[in-house]
Amino acid sequence: MRSSNPVFSRRGFSRDNGYAGFNTAPQAGYAQGNPYAQNPYANNPYAQQDLQQGAPPQAPATTGRMTMDDVITRSATTLGTVAVGAVLAWTLLPISTTSYGLAVGSAIIAFVLAMIQSFKRNPVPALILGYAAFEGVFLGVISEMYNSQWSGAPFQAVLGTMAVSAATLLVYRAGWIRVTARYARIGMAIAIAFVLVMAVNLLLVAFGVAENGGLRSFGPLGAIVGIIAILLGAFFLTLDFKQIEDGIAYGAPKNEAWLAAFGLTMTLVWIYIEMLRLVAIFSSND
């Protein structure tokens, strides 16, 4: 099972054996039928290194292995790049047809860079930071557009994104959510179904079959869809948290912290965009 974000193909830390976490210790409810339940470290190369030395996997104490500080530093760098790109776009690009075109172009480039990184065997910081920069330009333009119609919407969306992230981390750390293989499968099935439905809705809107945005309208139905999308974003965060936790515990290479930053950035961008739409919907109905 691969930890995932809106770019569903993103690889996990232990890519050499095609495994991305989730087979830590046997969890109640999915031990049956799980080939790793008897030996939870069987397919994780980092855990095997520790087991061969006669010690259980633990947080790395040696250099060259990923630590939480590495994850925080890389994530701050990546999110900071997004923020700088957004501020520059907001400041330097006035609302116009040209800026909208640049936003669409930036979004496409960011998506392409994200897909390239997703299929790379190793993290490439230049690709990740390039994705962050172009994503920032896109977010800056659309944030300015939303702010021109609903004053303060971007600020509220940022606060909402921070609140969802903090609440999800709190729930995860408290153990109220257990990221098991079954949990991941069910969540991913819902996420894929959601994306497919949104793709169909986009086609229906483009061909004039659905009016006013269809399921993405600025009405009650659009608000419900937005809430579902934000909940899916929280689900992606739990997968990211689990992947980071396992990567540190199993001694993943230090450069894998870039993958953690990449995943967290994509998830937070997803939540922010959906939060921005939701704020606009509620503001429109006031």
Image: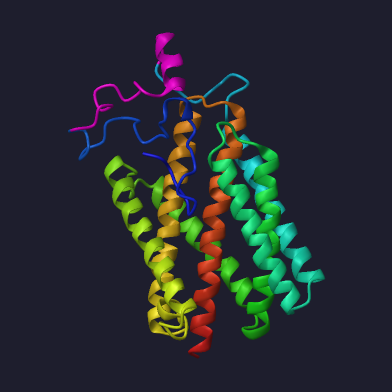
Instruction: Say whether residue 236 is left or right of residue 108.
Output: left
Color scheme of the displayed model: rainbow
Helix, strand or loop for the magenta stretch, by majority: loop
Name the spot of residue 125 as percent of width and height, x first.
67, 39
- Which stretch appears magenta? 33-55
Q: Give the number of marks.
A: 0
Q: Identify which residue is drawn at 65% across, 50% down.
A: 131
Residue placed furthest toward the front: 207
Q: Identify which residue is drawn at 38% across, 80% down.
A: 221
Residue 257 lies in quadrant: top right
Q: Is residue 133 rendered magenta in the image?
A: no
Residue placed furthest toward the left: 32
Name the spot of residue 5 as percent of width and height, x first.
47, 51
Residue placed furthest toward the bottom: 286
**Relative to residue 253, is residue 75 depicted above or below?**
below
Q: Can the viewer see residue 77?
A: no
Q: Can the viewer see residue 241?
A: yes
Residue 269 lies in quadrant: bottom right
Q: Identify which residue is drawn at 40% across, 59% down.
A: 232
Taking depth in this image into account, of 159 and 126 the one nearest to the observer is: 126
Taking depth in this image into account, of 168 and 41 the one nearest to the observer is: 41
**Relative to residue 76, is residue 96 depicted above or below?**
below
**Relative to residue 36, is residue 142 depicted above or below?**
below
